[in-house]
Structure formats: structure tokens, C-alpha cells
Image (spheres, grey):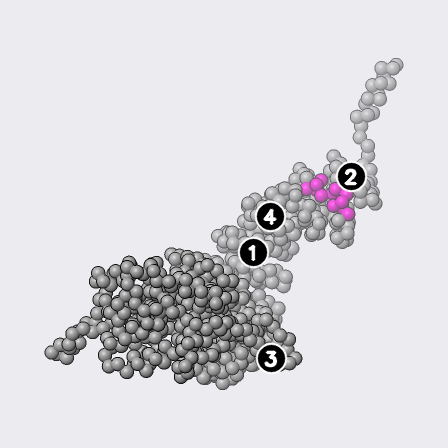
């Protein structure tokens, strides 16, 4: 009996329940059902989640928090077709939320989704592509889709009969072709015909996406060739000609711009009448945004020289000049950009001027739009490059004044273009003077401090053109522009460095500017550049030469040699041989140092009174003094430096930087110059002039000294006494009563230069220095020609007035013993 009951009980347990209706009102309960082993329950749970997620992002986030994502990702690979479909529907809807997308990135679900695209189920295709479209905005997901071979299948789905599948697939492809790898793959997989076919779609969203995708893929030349072969340009022009498709015109024009990018495509399109149709489209009044895009197409076309010729034949300049006067800023901006490109064709520059285009562009410089001002300045830069008539047209339109103002702007492009245009115009003297009168030098100072390479290139080039006037260089110095200019010598950008050297070469044309640049380390920086194989150039060497030729004190200190054409003037000083890598201090800086034990710095000053702005040395003309009774003042203890204040307006506070520096008058040197002019200059023979001058220098510096007794000559003690009397390391040469080779050679060179003779000044070792002169020897030959000149060393020390023929034992002995 017991066994029978037990058997009946076991039989009843094996039987199943009847189907039960499942109703879940709580999302958490439905999510739990995703783990059910029963397929019917899984389908109903997925459907419920799909319906719940469709209602909004809050529901999607709620489901994410309840843990619905991972089971759904597993269920899309379920063996049951209906479970797979409903799970994908739920997952596709949820994936449109950004939080869900972020979570999906951490789950390797993309291969599973792509695998489902091969199934013959339109609903699966729709929601699988929806999920991919959402994920493909992320770079990592795009790579996963590409690596999982998703692109070929997506391209095939562009032919799907379902518009949602087309749209989702196309959106995914559009996201992927932002990257070069996918752009190439779309072309190689035959995607261009498919994309062109979608332009005929009845759904605008698909047409827009197709055009945007074509815009990306046609940046590749091979893709453009295929696009042309598939009559893609003709289809675009049909869209542009149809007013019903005006919402597609902007995207269509952007694709057209790519198609016209290379000369080959442009030639073929032009032969088929495509260019004429495009020009008509630009002229025809339409939506300004579309018109702007059309003009941008012209600018894109004009990047090629061959294309510019064809556009010139189509009289594109006339169209562009007309568009410069329209009210819409975007159209005017695009027109300026097209003018810039077309200006590379010489004939176009002249035609723009003849059509009145230059005044039209100048008017745009005052526009409030920063983008338009930048485009206008760029157009003027290209129009005036190498074209004097266009430069004059800008000047007549008052453009130079506005361009100077633009140099102070915040837009780097506008500043660079303005500087370039002003540089192009500055080649003409009248225009240059007018540019400078509007404060161009002051305005260039800030751009010299820019970190933008193009600003620096154009600014230094403009500066080199403007600084050829003495007043301009003085203005640049006053405005504080020399230091930032010298700082550019530290640049490792080849063109910036080249232009900086060029500008420094021009600015070094006069002494005060050269001295100021030397103060800021220009010489040391140029030395470093010229020692570098990679950085040096002919221009850097030229800049160094110009600096030294305008600052003979530094030149003599560095090179130890002044040629006969190097004329010593007031303010010259001999600070001794320069130490490598150290900056050579100015005379004022040297004078401010405490008295030390080193040998004094000797300077030249023939002027009665000279005051210059620190730190420049005096550059005044010679001033004669006829007070011969003052010869005894040669040992005067008059202070060397005198600080005076500038006369200022009473309302201005006193500033230490406004003090002036004054060199001590050297009355003894003034008297020597006067004596030389009166007694030496009248001598008829040049040889006798040199000899007499040598004797005069010898007398002034303590007389002849026998070579054997040179060590007894008390010149060092005398100079130490002078330094103590003056309380300065800087000593005027006229006060030296006991001088040796270096002092006498400097004085001789100074006096020779004052009376129009010529000689060199060469520094030797151990306080040696000498002068070389060129003299003709013998009588003129029978045919009337003179003999060759010979070089002589002038003896100022032992046998004053003797001329020692160079390279002879006597001359060598004078130089080195």
C-alpha cells in the first residue's frame, strides 16, 4: 500500500503546470525575469523592458541601475529567434542613452551585435544597427566595429528595403568615416554607388546623412575618381538645380567643393558645363548660407594654378567683387577668401583692382566680425604681394591707416596679414612715410613678442621694410622694440630667425640703434648662431657685420681690427680684448662700475659738450675749441660723469630712467684735433703727413722710448693715478700723458680719421697695437700708371715718424717684441 502511494506521487511530480500569465509592474521584477530559463518569460520580459525604455531616458537609466544590461547582452545570442529579437529591441532602445553607451563600452558586445546583422530578420537589423549607430560616436567603438568586419555588412544594408535600417546603417558609416581608415574602406568595398543611390531617398534624413558621408569620403582622390565615374557630380548639380531640395544644397555644395579640389576632376567637370552651372548658382539670389557655401567652393577650386586660369576666363573676379558688397557677413567672408586664392594668379590681381575690388575689401577692415577682418586682411596681403599698383590702391583707399590699427588686435591671423600687407606697401617711399606717420613702429612692438610663428615672420619682414628710415629706427628704439627683436635670435624656426636677422641688419644702419641692440646681447646671440652649422646663414653673417660696423667699439674688442674705412667717432672706447661668450658692456655701464685694479677703458670724445640718452655713447660731430690757453687742463680732475635730469612737465613724476648720461669733455683731445688740422693737414705729401702726425702723437703720449728701456716707462702708474683722480675706470684718451703702443695707436687712428687720411688699427698681444697705412712708392711709370701701394707700420713709440714696411724684420719687431 505504501509503495503504491509513493509511486503515484512520483508520477504526479513529473507533470508540468499549465501556462501561467506573468504580470510584472515593478521594473526590478521584470529585470529578474531576464534570468528565467523559460523562453516565453524571457520574450515577455524583453518586450516589457523595450516598452518601458521607450518612454524616456530616466527609465533607461533606471534599468541600467537595476542590472538589465548584462543579461540583455547575453540574450541577443540566445538560441530562440524571438528571444534574440526582443532582446536586441530592448538593447537598441537602451543604447540611445549616454549612460548606457558608457556602460556598453565596458562589455564586449559589438562582435555579437555585428554577428546578428547576417540574420534574415529586418527587425533584428533595425535594432542592431540602431545600437551600432549609438555606439559608433565613440572612437574605441568605431575601431571595434571596423576590426569586427562590420563595415562590409553595413554597406550591404544600405540597400535594405527598410528605411530605418538604411538610416541606422548610414549613420554608423558616417560616424566611422570620420577616420581615414574607414574612408578608404568604404571606397574599396564599393560604397560610393550605394551612397549615391540614397540621394534619391524619399526621406530627407537619409539624404542629409548620405551627403555628409560623401563629403567625408570624397576628400580622398581615388574616391573622387570613382565618384566622378559614377556621375556623382551630375547628381549633385541636379540637386542644386532643384529648389525643392534647398535644404540639401549646403551639404551638396560641400561635396562639390571636394570634387573640384584637383585639376583633373575640375577640367572634366568644366568640359561638361559644370563650372558654368556652378557660377550661375552663385549669382542667382538664394539663401545666404547656401550662397556662402557656393563661394567657398570657388575658393576651394582656386587652390590650383590651372583652376585659377579657368576661373579667370569665366570672369569670376566680377562675381566676387559684387559679393563683397552684399549684406551677409558669411558671404563677404567667403568672397574675401576666394579673392585671396585667386590673387595668386597675376592677371586676377590687376582685374580685381580695375573692377574696384580693393576699396571694397578695405571697407571690410572696419567690420565688427573678427573672421571677416581676418579674411579681408589676408586678401589685401595677397593682392599687394609683388604688385605696386595694388599697394598704391590700398594706400589711396586709406587702408594703411586701418592696417596699422589692426596690428594691435587680438586675432593672430589679422595681425599677421596686416603686417604682411604693410610690408608689401612699404617698398614705396611715399607710402612708407605715411605708414610710419600713423605709429606703425609702436604698433609692431607687441607683435614682436607674439608666440605665433606667422605673426613673427610677417612682423619682422614688415619691420625690415620700414626700418630703412633713421627716424623709424629711433621710434622703434623709443618704443622698446629692439629688445623683443633681439630676443627672436633665440628662435629655432628657420624663417623667423632669417627675418629677425634681416631686420637687425637694417636696424644696425646707425650707431645708437646698433649700440642698443648690442646691449641686449645681439652680438653674443649672432656669434652663437654663426657658429652653428644648422642655424647660420648669409643673412646672420650680414647682420653681425652690420652690427659691428655700426658699433666699432664692440668690433675692435671682438676682432682686434679696424679697417681704414672704419671711422672712429665720439663715444668710441677700447675695453680690451673681449672674453668669449661674455657681453661687451656699454661705456655707461663700464663707467658705473666701482674702481678696480684692471687696466682702464680708454674713450674718445672731441665734442665740447655732448649728452645722449643712456646707454648710447655720444655720436655728435666734432666741435673745435680755440681756447689754446686751456692746454694745461689736460690733467684736470673734472668728474667724468654728470647726471642731469630731463626737463619734464611739472605734473609728471620724476623717474630715474629719465636721467641723462654725459661723457666728460676731453679738452686736450679737442686741442690736438685743432692742432692737427692746422699743422698736419696743410702738408703736401701724404708720407710726410703720416710722419708728422706720428711725431705729434708721440709727443702727446710721453715722447720716444728706447726699446731697451721700455720697462722703465711709468705708463701703468700714470694710468692708475688717472683712475684714482677721476674715481672711474673710464679715462678720456686726451688725459693720457704717458701711453704705450695701444694708447698711441688709438690716438693716431682717431686723429687720422679726423683729417680725412686713412689707416687701420690692429690689436696685438701684451698691450701692443699698431697702425697700417698704404703708400705708393717710386715714380709713376712711363705709361702713366702708378705703382702698386705698399703697407707700412707707423712707429709711434721708438723712432716716431718712421714708416716700417710691413713684414720686414723691423715691422715684425715693432708688432711682437
> Residue 8 at what x, y percent from top left?
84, 21
Name the foreground residue: 183 vs 332: 332
Give the CA distance from mark 2 to mark 3: 90 Å
For marks 1 and 2, give the CA distance. 40 Å
Helix, strand or loop status at disc 3: loop
Q: Residue at x 60, y 45 (%)?
A: 114
Q: Position of residue 633 (x, y in %)?
A: 43, 76
Residue wearing tag 4: 140
Q: Which residues are magenta?
A: 62-73
Indicate yes or no whether the magenta region holds residue 38. Answer: no
Mark 2 or 3, nearer chain start = 2
**What residue is shown at x 83% (from left), y 45% (from top)?**
25
Mark before the other along the chain sequence, 4 or 1: 4
Q: Earlier in the sequence, mark 1 or mark 2?
A: 2
Q: Secondary structure at mark 2?
A: helix
Decide: few, some or many residues near mark 4? Use Cα within 10 Å; few <14, some 14-19, many ≥20.
few
**Left or right of 444 on screen, residue 698:** left
Residue drawn at the location 54% of the way across and 66% of the way down: 449
In 3D space, how far apart are the residues under numbered discs 4 and 1 (Cα atoms)? 13 Å
Q: CA distance from mark 4 to mark 2?
A: 31 Å
Vertical placement of residue 735 versus 18, above or below? below
Q: Which residue is mark 3?
A: 648
Determine the image quadrant of residue 294.
bottom right
Q: Residue at label 1?
A: 178
What residue is rendered at 57% in x and 69% in y?
411
Closest to the camera, between mark 1 and mark 2, is 1
Disc 1/disc 3 C-alpha distance (Å): 66 Å
Q: Which residue is mark 2?
A: 32
Amino acid at each position: 500500500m505504501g509503495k503504491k502511494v509513493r509511486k503515484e506521487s512520483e508520477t504526479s511530480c513529473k507533470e508540468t503546470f499549465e501556462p501561467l500569465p506573468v504580470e510584472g509592474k515593478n521594473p526590478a521584477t521584470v529585470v529578474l525575469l531576464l534570468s528565467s530559463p523559460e523562453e516565453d518569460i524571457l520574450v515577455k520580459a524583453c518586450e516589457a523592458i523595450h516598452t518601458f525604455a521607450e518612454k524616456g531616458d530616466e527609465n533607461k537609466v533606471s534599468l541600467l541601475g537595476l542590472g538589465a544590461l548584462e543579461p540583455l547582452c547575453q540574450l541577443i545570442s540566445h538560441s530562440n529567434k524571438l528571444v534574440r529579437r526582443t532582446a536586441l529591441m530592448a538593447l537598441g532602445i537602451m543604447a540611445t542613452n549616454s549612460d548606457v553607451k558608457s556602460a556598453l563600452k565596458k562589455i564586449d558586445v559589438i562582435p555579437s551585435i555585428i554577428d546578428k546583422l547576417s540574420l534574415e530578420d529586418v527587425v533584428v537589423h533595425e535594432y542592431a544597427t540602431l545600437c551600432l549607430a549609438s555606439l559608433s560616436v565613440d572612437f574605441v567603438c568605431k575601431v571595434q566595429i571596423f576590426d569586427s568586419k562590420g563595415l562590409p555588412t553595413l554597406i550591404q544594408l544600405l540597400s535594405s528595403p527598410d528605411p530605418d535600417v538604411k538610416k541606422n546603417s548610414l549613420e554608423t558609416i558616417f560616424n566611422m568615416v570620420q577616420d581615414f581608415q574607414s574612408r578608404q574602406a568604404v571606397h574599396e568595398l564599393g560604397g560610393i554607388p550605394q551612397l549615391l543611390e540614397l540621394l534619391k531617398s524619399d526621406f530627407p534624413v537619409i539624404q542629409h546623412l548620405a551627403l555628409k558621408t560623401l563629403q567625408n569620403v570624397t576628400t580622398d582622390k581615388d574616391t573622387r575618381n570613382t565618384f566622378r565615374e559614377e556621375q556623382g557630380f551630375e547628381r549633385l548639380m541636379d540637386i542644386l538645380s532643384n529648389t525643392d531640395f534647398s535644404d540639401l544644397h549646403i551639404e551638396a555644395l560641400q561635396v562639390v567643393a571636394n570634387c573640384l579640389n584637383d585639376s583633373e576632376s575640375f577640367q572634366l567637370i568644366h568640359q561638361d558645363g559644370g563650372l558654368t552651372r556652378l557660377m550661375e548658382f552663385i549669382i542667382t539670389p538664394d539663401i545666404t548660407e547656401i550662397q556662402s557655401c557656393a563661394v567657398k567652393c570657388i575658393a576651394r577650386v582656386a587652390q590650383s594654378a590651372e583652376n585659377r586660369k579657368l576661373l579667370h576666363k569665366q570672369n569670376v573676379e566680377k562675381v566676387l567683387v559684387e559679393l563683397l558688397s552684399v549684406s551677409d557677413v558669411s558671404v563677404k567672408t567667403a568672397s574675401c577668401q576666394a579673392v585671396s586664392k585667386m590673387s595668386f594668379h597675376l592677371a586676377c590681381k590687376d582685374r580685381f583692382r580695375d573692377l574696384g575690388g580693393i576699396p571694397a575689401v578695405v571697407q571690410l577692415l572696419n567690420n565688427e566680425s573678427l573672421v571677416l577682418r581676418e579674411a579681408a586682411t589676408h586678401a589685401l596681403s595677397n593682392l599687394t604681394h609683388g604688385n605696386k599698383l595694388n599697394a598704391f590702391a590700398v594706400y589711396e583707399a586709406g587702408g594703411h591707416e586701418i592696417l596699422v590699427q589692426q596690428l594691435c588686435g587680438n586675432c593672430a591671423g589679422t595681425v599677421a596679414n596686416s603686417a604682411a600687407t604693410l610690408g608689401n606697401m612699404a617698398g614705396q617711399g611715399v607710402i612708407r612715410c605715411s605708414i610710419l606717420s600713423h605709429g606703425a613702429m609702436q604698433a609692431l612692438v607687441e607683435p614682436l613678442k607674439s608666440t605665433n610663428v606667422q605673426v613673427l615672420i610677417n612682423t619682422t619682414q614688415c619691420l625690415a621694410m620700414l626700418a630703412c628710415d633713421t627716424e623709424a629706427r629711433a621710434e622703434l628704439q623709443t618704443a622698446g622694440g629692439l629688445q623683443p627683436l633681439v630676443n627672436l635670435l633665440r628662435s629655432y624656426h628657420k624663417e623667423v630667425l632669417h627675418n629677425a636677422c634681416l631686420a637687425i641688419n637694417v636696424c644696425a644702419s646707425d650707431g645708437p640703434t646698433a649700440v642698443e641692440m648690442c646691449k641686449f646681447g645681439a652680438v653674443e646671440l649672432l656669434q652663437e648662431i654663426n657658429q652653428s652649422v644648422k642655424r647660420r646663414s648669409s643673412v646672420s653673417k650680414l647682420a653681425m657685420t652690420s652690427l659691428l660696423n655700426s658699433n666699432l667699439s664692440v668690433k675692435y674688442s671682438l676682432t682686434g681690427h679696424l679697417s681704414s674705412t672704419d671711422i672712429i667717432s665720439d663715444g668710441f672706447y677700447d675695453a680690451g680684448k673681449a672674453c668669449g661668450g661674455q657681453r661687451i658692456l656699454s661705456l655707461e655701464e663700464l663707467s658705473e662700475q666701482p674702481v678696480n685694479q684692471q687696466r682702464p677703458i680708454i674713450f674718445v670724445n672731441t665734442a665740447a659738450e655732448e649728452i645722449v640718452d643712456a646707454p648710447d655713447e655720444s655720436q655728435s660731430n666734432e666741435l673745435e675749441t680755440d681756447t689754446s690757453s686751456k692746454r694745461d687742463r689736460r690733467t684736470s680732475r673734472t668728474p667724468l660723469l654728470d647726471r642731469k635730469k630731463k626737463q619734464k612737465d611739472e605734473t609728471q613724476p620724476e623717474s630715474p630712467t629719465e636721467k641723462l648720461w654725459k661723457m666728460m669733455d676731453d679738452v686736450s683731445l679737442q686741442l690736438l684735433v685743432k692742432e692737427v688740422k692746422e699743422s698736419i693737414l696743410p702738408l703736401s705729401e701724404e708720407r710726410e703727413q703720416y710722419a708728422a702726425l706720428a711725431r705729434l702723437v708721440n709727443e702727446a703720449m710721453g715722447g720716444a722710448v728706447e726699446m731697451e728701456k721700455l720697462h722703465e716707462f711709468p705708463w701703468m702708474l700714470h694710468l692708475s693715478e688717472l683712475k684714482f683722480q677721476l674715481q672711474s675706470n673710464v679715462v678720456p684718451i686726451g688725459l693720457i700723458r704717458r701711453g704705450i703702443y695701444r694708447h698711441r695707436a688709438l690716438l693716431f687712428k682717431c686723429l687720422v680719421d679726423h683729417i680725412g687720411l686713412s689707416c687701420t688699427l690692429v690689436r696685438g698681444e701684451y698691450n701692443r697695437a699698431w697702425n697700417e697705412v698704404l703708400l705708393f712708392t717710386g715714380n709713376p711709370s712711363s705709361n702713366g700708371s702708378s705703382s702698386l701701394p705698399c703697407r707700412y707700420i707707423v712707429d709711434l713709440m721708438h723712432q716716431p715718424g718712421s714708416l716700417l714696411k710691413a713684414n720686414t724684420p723691423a715691422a715684425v719687431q715693432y708688432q711682437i717684441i
